[in-house]
Image: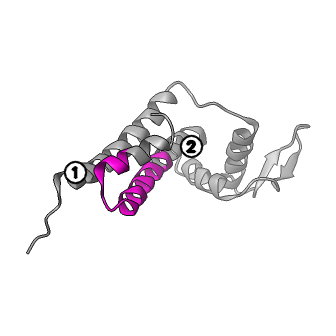
Amino acid sequence: MGSYIPDASRKTILAIPVLAVIGMGSVLLATSVGMGVSSDSIVYVDSARHLADGEGYFTKADCGVKAPVIKWPPLFPMILSTFDILGIDPLLGARWLNAFLFGANILLVGVLIYNLTKGAFYISILGRRSCGPI
């Protein structure tokens, strides 16, 4: 015997992944001419390139000397270094990785709201709207 899913819940179940894909597309569209680069981004990409070259978790300091990275966590540069090893520019890899992670966040928050509201369609939409502008 199959379980009955009300139309409102069915709409919510279908809306969550659609919103995640739209979010991913919006990040890719917003970064199509290049991503905003901050000092943190420079350290992440530079340390990823050093990791891919087998030099360790280092970056170039302001004076041009190679220095160990001690202020930033290593996971993001490690993931970016795999892009570099595969022949993909770490900046391009960061763009796609950030788009994927943004979509995953939308999907996970949508599922969380859906489960916390017991699938109530309008409450789920209100919860999504309260998370920020779309």
Residue at x-position 52% and y-position 50%:
86
Q: Secondary structure at mark 1?
A: helix
Left or right? Give the position of 31 relative to 37: left
Q: Position of residue 28 (x, y in %)?
A: 46, 34
> Pointers 2 and 1 in contact (CB under 8 A)?
no
Against 37, residue 49 (above or below) is below
Look at the image and tell me whether residue 88 can be seen.
no
What number is the disc on residue 67? none
Predominant secondary structure in magenta? Answer: helix
Which image quarter is the N terminus in?
A: bottom left
Q: Secondary structure at mark 2?
A: helix
Question: Magenta includes 65?
Answer: no
Label 1: which residue? 8
Label 2: which residue? 94
Left or right? Give the position of 119 relative to 129: left
At label 2, counting other C-alpha atoms closer than 10 Å, the crowd grade (few under 14, some 14-19, many 20 or more) is many
Q: Amino acid at mark 1?
A: Ala
Residue at x-position 44% and y-position 41%:
129
Against 32, residue 107 (above or below) is below
- Bounds of the magenta segment: 101-125
Q: Position of residue 75 (x, y in %)?
A: 64, 58
State the residue in front, 19 or 99. 19
Against 10, residue 40 (above or below) is above
Q: Amino acid at mark 2?
A: Ala
Spatial CA distance of label 2 from label 1 is: 37 Å
Q: Position of residue 73 (x, y in %)?
A: 72, 57
Q: Position of residue 29 (x, y in %)?
A: 45, 29
Residue at x-position 68% and y-position 52%:
53
* N-term-proximal mark, 2 vs 1: 1
Which image quarter is the C terminus in?
A: top left
Quarter of the image holding residue 19? top left
